[in-house]
Image (spheres, rainbow, N blue to C red):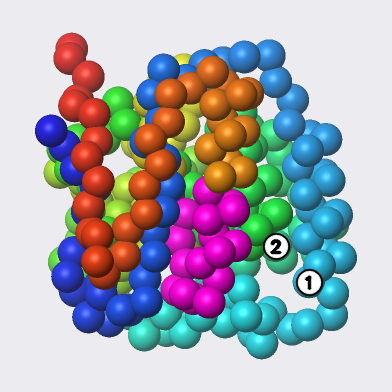
Amino acid sequence: MRKFLIEEKVFELFPQTRVCGLVIENMDNGIPWDGTVILGQACQEVAIRLGETPFAESPFFAPWRAAFKLFGAPKGYRSSVEALAKRAVKGSCPSSINPLVDLYNVTSLKFLFPCGAEDLDAVVGDVRLRPAGGGEPFLPLGAEEDDPPREEEMVYIDDAGAICRCWNWREADRTKLTRGTKRALLCMESLAPERDEEMRKALAFIDETIRKSLGAATTPFWLDSECRHVDLPGERSH
């Protein structure tokens, strides 16, 4: 049995870490789909919600800025939720990509947590959230050249290399979701325990939406310092 686990070092640096999500199986991510309308609505709503508060002072983004600074992320690297919200506020809504990507982007905008997913049939071995050793293979989504993580930056990593750099900044091309994806690991993250109730609502929202929209079987999970791993389905046989 494979696992997704958060290593001890993460909690030593960030004791309030929460990573919740879904293990998704038997998903139809190839249904006829255009997420333009739901993405546009989510962008409009978050722009109103955020108002004029500077992002650096926002309770939704400031904890991630502090975390990125602590583990030495390059200047200008921001959490996925801040990058997504910044686009929304500027009137540049993300394009529709495929059902699961669109649904997690809508959830991220609606509840203001970083959210992303990996194709489990492209993942090799266990998935770990841990500090990088530095230099692990990493081809960013849509890129042509390798861009390895720096030493000690937080990464999601499997046995073949990093699959998401700077915690939730950029995903790997190797494990990206496609319309042919059947199984996925979806993660949503928080560093603010005072937002636990809202995070549970976000998890319930995306769980129900994926099951109803994509006909998937889902297993929700919640990881923190008290529970640090969840089982994953085995690798696809070739």
Q: Which mark is residue 85?
A: 2
Judged from the image, the secondary structure of the residue bearing numbered disc 1 is: helix
User: Where does residue 121 sit, x and y in percent of width and height?
Assistant: 30, 26
Count of numbered circles in the view: 2
Say which amino acid is labelled 1.
Leu
Of mark 1 and mark 2, the one earlier in the sequence is: 1
Kindly report which numbered mark, 1 or 2, lies closer to the viewer in this rendering.
1
94 w.r.t. 219: above or below: below
Is residue 142 found left or right of 222 in the rendered image? right
Locate residue 129: give its quadrant: bottom left
194 w.r.t. 28: above or below: below
104 w.r.t. 46: above or below: above
Which residue is at 48% across, 47% downward? 116
Is residue 188 found left or right of 82 in the rendered image? left
Q: Which residue is mark 1?
A: 50
Please indicate, yes or no, whether residue 13 appears anywhere in the rendered image.
yes
Judged from the image, the secondary structure of the residue bearing numbered disc 2 is: helix
User: Where does residue 49 sit, x and y in percent of width and height?
Assistant: 81, 67
Say which amino acid is labelled 2.
Ala
Which residue is at 19% across, 25% downward? 235
Which residue is at 24% across, 60% downward? 227
Q: Residue furthest front?
A: 197
Q: Is residue 198 magenta?
A: yes
**Of helix, strand and loop, which mostly describes the magenta segment?**
helix
Crowd band around label 1 with a 10 angstrom C-alpha radius: few (<14), some (14–19), many (20+): some
Which residue is at 49% across, 76% downward? 192
Q: Look at the image and give the residue range highlighted in magenta.
A: 187-203
User: Where does residue 32 sit, x and y in percent of width and height?
Assistant: 68, 14
- Of residue 46 and residue 122, the one placed in the foreground of this image is 46
Contact between marks 1 and 2 (CB within 8 A): the answer is: yes
Locate residue 219: give its quadrant: top left
